[in-house]
């Protein structure tokens, strides 16, 4: 509750900085899992001419593991995390109009 007092100062940029001055752009997507959930996150690594590269968060997705099923194995959850990462990458590419 103490942290909520700073909530008004929170700023989340909507623009990732992609434009004509970008000389290099990469998308990095990571997937992971634990015993209770699996998740994926996508970042953009952008570089302007004569500047250091910078990284910005594009999107993330988390799903809770179905604990009703007995014996949800760690390898299965890792595969679900990988599948989620692939689907997230496809969604990001589509949103940014990037072809393979």
Image (cartoon, grey):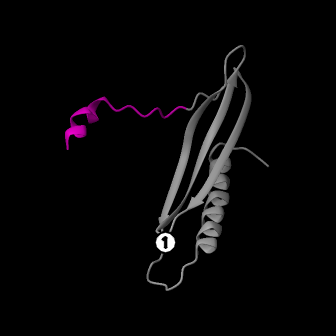
**8 versus 34 height, above or below:** above
**71 versus 75 height, above or below:** below
Residue 84 vs residue 66: left or right?
right
* Percent of width and height locating residue 14: 48, 35
Tag 1 secondary structure: loop
Taking the view exactly as shown, the residue that stands out farthest to the bottom is: 70
* Percent of width and height locating residue 11: 38, 31
Query: What residue is shown with label 1?
Result: 65
Q: Which residues are magenta?
A: 1-15
* Percent of width and height locating residue 5: 21, 35
Residue 93 vs residue 13: left or right?
right
Q: Which residue is located at x 27 percent, y 32 percent?
A: 8
Q: Which residue is located at x 71 percent, y 37 percent?
A: 26
Q: Nearer the viewer, residue 70 or 42?
A: 70
* Percent of width and height locating residue 3: 25, 38
Quadrant for residue 87, please give it.
bottom right
Q: Magenta span has 6?
A: yes
Q: Which residue is located at x 65 percent, y 65 percent?
A: 83
Q: Magenta span has 93?
A: no
Q: Quadrant of the N terminus?
A: top left
Q: Which residue is located at x 63 percent, y 29 percent?
A: 18
Q: Nearer the viewer, residue 42 or 20?
A: 42
């Amino acid at each position: 509750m103490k942290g909520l007092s700073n909530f008004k100062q929170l700023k989340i940029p909507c623009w990732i900085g992609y434009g004509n001055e970008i000389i290099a752009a990469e998308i990095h997507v990571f997937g992971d899992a634990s015993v209770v959930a699996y998740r994926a996150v996508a970042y953009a690594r952008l570089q302007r001419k004569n500047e250091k590269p910078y990284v910005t968060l594009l999107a993330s997705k988390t799903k809770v593991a179905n604990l009703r099923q007995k014996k949800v194995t760690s390898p299965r959850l890792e595969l679900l995390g990988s599948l989620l990462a692939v689907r997230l990458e496809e969604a990001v590419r589509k949103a940014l109009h990037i072809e393979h």
